[in-house]
Image (tube, coloured by chain):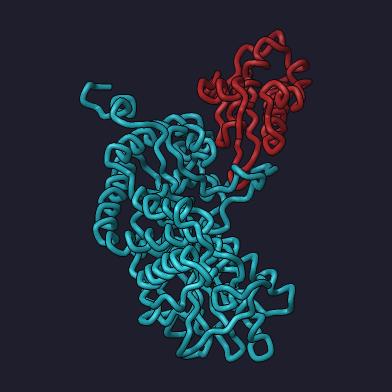
Chain colours: A red, B cyan
């Protein structure tokens, strides 16, 4: 299976690998997928007081396409407001990385991971308010 | 990093990349095999079934010599060997041919759920035709339980088909014991020996084997040829042919034989028989070096399949918390195969590993390493270092590894699934 240059670049040089402090109230954590399915993504966002995502980190257990999809979305969400980040569609991820049809689920998972991280952040924020 | 540390980068200049480590998928042809085949493409091109001239006689003589070489490897004579296109065809003929022939008297087939797809698919096909099939489970080490086999075989069982060596995990089934049980119960014993012939000693008499499938390209021979051993006496095995035609190969497999391919298979068998002892000794040394190299440097690695009852040329390893396909992508200089079937359209992990009771998440972390005749020590050392470095990198990116390090039980988490 031939992968696109962009995908291979993200896989070989993944951006923003790591973890943020999940106890921090400005951090939202999304953990999606399941080990039994062969894909687990953890995506974290750090949101500033102005609602803009300052930082994003990921760790992924999964195939090369899953790793590249998560690396890409950490780049995309940075600098966006959470409302903007929430609008990222899996089709945009799939198109950007030229994912083959059998790997589309990786982009779906990445979209879910963003949504889950944002939902976690909102729960924390609203709980505090 | 200090200067004395061994790294893949330091080992790299000494070897040619990529390194082939997928000997269970196929093997390169041995040059000696090619040399033996060459004349039968160009100068000695006769049809071995032509009886009226020397072109035909020469080709026939070569084919019969090859037949004897194949037979000799497994302890039988030339007459019991039928040439086929490969082990898939041999398995199809054995299962469908025997079951259909004995349909009136016995309609039950016993096989195991770790068999090759072509055996399992033939069995399913037979079920659709109305035959009864029992799929034996395997124990955690990949071997069948002989008591379960004994209980499964009845007076209605026509055939027991159990593979000699598993293609994914390299375990060797207890053939002699299986043969004895089959003989006691009056059922024929077929073994798919695609991964076993030329790798382990096989003797159809001592092991009471009635049918055996052999593949050319797994033993440094050409692709597109295989053989089926069909016992001719005590007891004689009869079967219904799948192909209609000129009645070649004792009527069991019609179609003109390819002398160069037959000669290639014969030569590959002869070489394997001569060199098996020395080759296995060398492979065992390389496999130990590989296994120890990994185990000494990486924690939480599991060898799938029985530790002792295995061929030396196979290592199926689960690297916990690292997904197999990303691993294969990371070690792109090494041609290995994923224990998980993720590279195909299916997202299911290997059914063989699942049959061993390997948990689904672990089955997703497996890779199959196949060593063979042309694998060198330098290649093993480079492969080991590459794997060590990539596993460490991928684990540092794995949320599961992070959670395990934090002491979180992964089973306690409610996964969202997908």
For the point 73% across and 13% down, which residue is it? Answer: A81
Q: Is residue B191 visible?
A: no
Q: Position of residue B168 (x, y in %)?
A: 48, 55
Q: Position of residue B307 (x, y in %)?
A: 35, 60
Q: Is residue B245 above or below residue B285?
A: below
Query: Seen in the image, is A81 located left or right of residue B219?
Result: right
Q: Position of residue B347 (x, y in %)?
A: 64, 46
For the point 42% across and 57% down, which residue is it? Answer: B264
Of residue B344 and residue A63, the one placed in the foreground of this image is: B344
Q: Is residue B363 above or below residue B181?
A: above
- Give the quadrant of residue B270: bottom left
The quadrant of the rendering that contains the N terminus of chain B is top left
Q: Is residue A57 above or below residue A113?
A: above
Quick one: which residue is furthest to the top in this view?
A50
- Give the quadrant of residue B386: top left
Of residue B59 and residue A41, the one placed in the foreground of this image is: B59
Query: Seen in the image, is B259 located left or right of residue B198?
Result: right
For the point 64% across and 68% down, which residue is it? Answer: B122
Of residue B164 and residue B34, the one placed in the foreground of this image is: B34
């Amino acid at each position: 299976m031939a992968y696109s240059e962009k995908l291979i670049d993200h896989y070989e040089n993944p951006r923003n690998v790591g973890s943020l402090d999940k106890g921090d109230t400005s951090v939202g954590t999304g953990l999606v997928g399941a080990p039994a399915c062969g894909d687990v993504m953890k995506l974290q966002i750090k949101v500033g007081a102005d609602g803009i995502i300052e930082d994003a980190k990921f760790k992924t257990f999964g195939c090369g396409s899953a790793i590249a999809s998560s690396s890409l979305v950490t780049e995309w969400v940075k600098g966006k407001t959470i409302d903007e980040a929430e609008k990222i569609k899996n089709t945009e991820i799939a198109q950007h990385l030229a994912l083959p049809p059998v790997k589309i689920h990786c982009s779906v998972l990445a979209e879910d991971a963003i949504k889950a991280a944002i939902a976690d952040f909102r729960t924390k924020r609203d709980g505090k308010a | 990093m200090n200067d004395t540390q061994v790294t893949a980068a330091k080992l790299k200049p000494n070897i040619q990349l990529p390194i082939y480590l997928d000997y269970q998928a196929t093997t390169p042809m041995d040059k000696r095999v090619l040399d033996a085949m060459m004349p039968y493409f160009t100068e000695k091109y006769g049809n071995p079934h032509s009886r009226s001239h020397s072109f035909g006689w020469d080709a026939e003589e070569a084919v019969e010599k090859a037949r004897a070489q194949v037979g000799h490897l497994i302890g039988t004579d030339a007459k019991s060997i039928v040439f086929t296109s490969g082990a898939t065809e041999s398995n199809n003929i054995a299962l469908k041919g025997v079951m259909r022939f004995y349909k009136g008297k016995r309609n039950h087939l016993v096989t195991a759920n770790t068999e090759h797809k072509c055996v399992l698919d033939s069995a399913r096909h037979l079920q659709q035709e109305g035959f009864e099939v029992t799929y034996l489970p395997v124990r955690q080490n990949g071997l069948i339980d002989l008591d379960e086999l004994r209980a499964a075989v009845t007076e209605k069982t026509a055939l027991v088909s159990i593979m000699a060596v598993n293609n994914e995990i390299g375990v060797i089934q207890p053939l002699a014991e299986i043969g004895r049980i089959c003989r006691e119960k009056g059922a024929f014993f077929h073994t798919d020996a695609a991964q076993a012939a030329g790798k382990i000693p096989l003797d159809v008499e001592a092991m009471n084997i009635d049918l055996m499938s052999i593949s050319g390209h797994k033993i440094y021979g050409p692709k597109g040829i295989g053989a089926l051993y069909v016992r001719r006496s005590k007891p004689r095995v009869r079967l219904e042919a799948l192909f209609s035609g000129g009645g070649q190969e004792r009527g069991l497999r019609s179609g003109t034989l390819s002398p160069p391919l037959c000669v290639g298979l014969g030569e590959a068998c002869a070489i394997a028989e001569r060199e098996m002892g020395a080759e296995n000794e060398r492979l065992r040394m390389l496999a130990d070096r590989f296994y120890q190299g990994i185990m000494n440097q990486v924690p939480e690695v599991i060898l799938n399949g029985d530790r002792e009852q295995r061929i030396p040329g196979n290592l199926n390893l689960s690297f916990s918390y690292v997904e197999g396909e990303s691993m294969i992508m990371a070690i792109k200089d090494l041609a290995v195969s994923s224990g998980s079937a993720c590279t195909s359209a299916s997202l299911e992990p290997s059914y063989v590993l699942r049959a061993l009771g390997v948990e689904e998440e672990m089955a997703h972390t497996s890779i199959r390493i196949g060593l063979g005749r042309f694998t060198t020590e330098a290649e093993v050392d480079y492969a080991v270092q590459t794997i060590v470095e990539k596993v460490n990198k991928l684990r540092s990116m794995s949320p599961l590894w992070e959670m395990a390090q934090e002491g979180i039980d992964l089973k306690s988490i409610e996964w969202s699934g997908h």
